[in-house]
Amino acid sequence: MHKVQILSAVIKKSCVIFILICIFLPFVCATQTKVSNIQPIKKIYLKKESDKYYFCVDFENSVHFSPRIHTLPKGAKLILSFKEKVRAPKTPKIKNHKLINGYFFEQIGESSLLMILSLKERVNFVEKRYTNNSIRLGFKLQKKRNIVIDAGHGGKDPGTRCLSGDYEKNIALIAAIELRNKLTASGKYNVILTRDRDQFVPIEKRKELAANADLLISLHTDSNSDKKMRGMSVYTLPTLDFVKNESTIPQQESDEYYKNLARSRKFANTLVSYIPTSCKFKNHPRRDVELKILKLLYPAILIVLGCVSNKIDNQLLHSRAFREKTNRAILYALDKFFEKEE
Ligand SMILES: [Zn+2]
């Protein structure tokens, strides 16, 4: 072969090799980088200690990380920042776990991971702890409270008569059903209605239905000869000085009475603070009344939703928007009340 031909063949070959290197080098480098990224998570598991659960993430010993932990009612969001380049671990599929819906990781940049934990139940996180090579998130299951909603009157007992001709028993029933739906939908409460239709339920039967409750809310309206009188009010029992035959009550019962009265008043005050100003209150929204339905071994309040003898209140009591506002306030007040007690 001629020398020039040999030289040209060598140049051609070199060009092909150079082009091939240019094309494949970035891939080779990328693959190498990917391989050098460490997978920092060693083990993830859930453990139980008495009434507390711990969601545990264990890391490889050599890893250094700093976490940002955001807890949610049904889970947690963790952002883990590492000193080294990391890659997300494979997430196992979780089937039929009693508490965990699942968890997954997502890469953020080269050295951070986002981790989402999703739980099946609402929980209260009580501990967020991390060391050099582990994270422990301690939580307790939220206790579902039993709430009894007592729609006032019913059947042969119609209650007060509205300007529109309707009766208190119907207003109380609609309000009670909508409140039941709202509380149940929150997932935090078991609700019992003392009646869910237009029927007469004797007081003793109502109290029997409410036997295992954590709190009772009785719903009513009132009527006044003064047609200008309007607004909501919240009632609890009076102190024993105003209760008939109070001298016959033994000390233990009296202590129990005051304990429940204090809790009832606490809830009533919380509720008054949550009712929006657009729902008018009477001058003294917190009142006392001696009613059998409120004499229970747990907090009990009676809400007068408005005066059916007043034109504006009469309209409001038949408005879904008004009921939505008051029901939302009751839900918030319940959340606040029980949150403090946990
Ligand atoms: Zn009534």
Image (cartoon, rainbow, N blue to C red):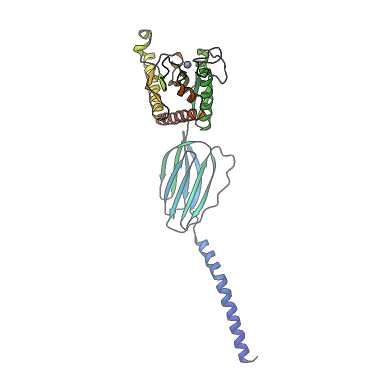
Of residues 215 and 310, the one nearer the viewer is 310
Q: Is residue 55 above or below residue 61?
A: above
Image quarter in which the C terminus is found:
top left
Image quarter in which the N terminus is found:
bottom right
Q: How many marks?
A: 0
Can residue 102 be seen from the camera position used here? yes
Of residues 119 and 321, the one nearer the viewer is 321
User: Horizontal and vertical percent for residue 241?
Assistant: 34, 12
Would residue 183 be found to the left or right of residue 16 on screen? left
Q: Is residue 230 above or below residue 86?
A: above
Q: Is residue 32 above or below residue 75?
A: below
For the point 58% across and 80% down, which residue is it? 15
- Residue with the most extreme right position: 1
User: Horizontal and vertical percent for residue 308?
Assistant: 47, 19
In which quadrant of the rendered view does residue 12 lie? bottom right
User: Horizontal and vertical percent for residue 274?
Assistant: 41, 30
Can residue 215 be seen from the camera position used here? no
- Residue with the most extreme left position: 241
- Residue with the most extreme bottom position: 2
User: Horizontal and vertical percent for residue 318?
Assistant: 51, 24
For the point 49% across and 59% down, which residue is it? 37
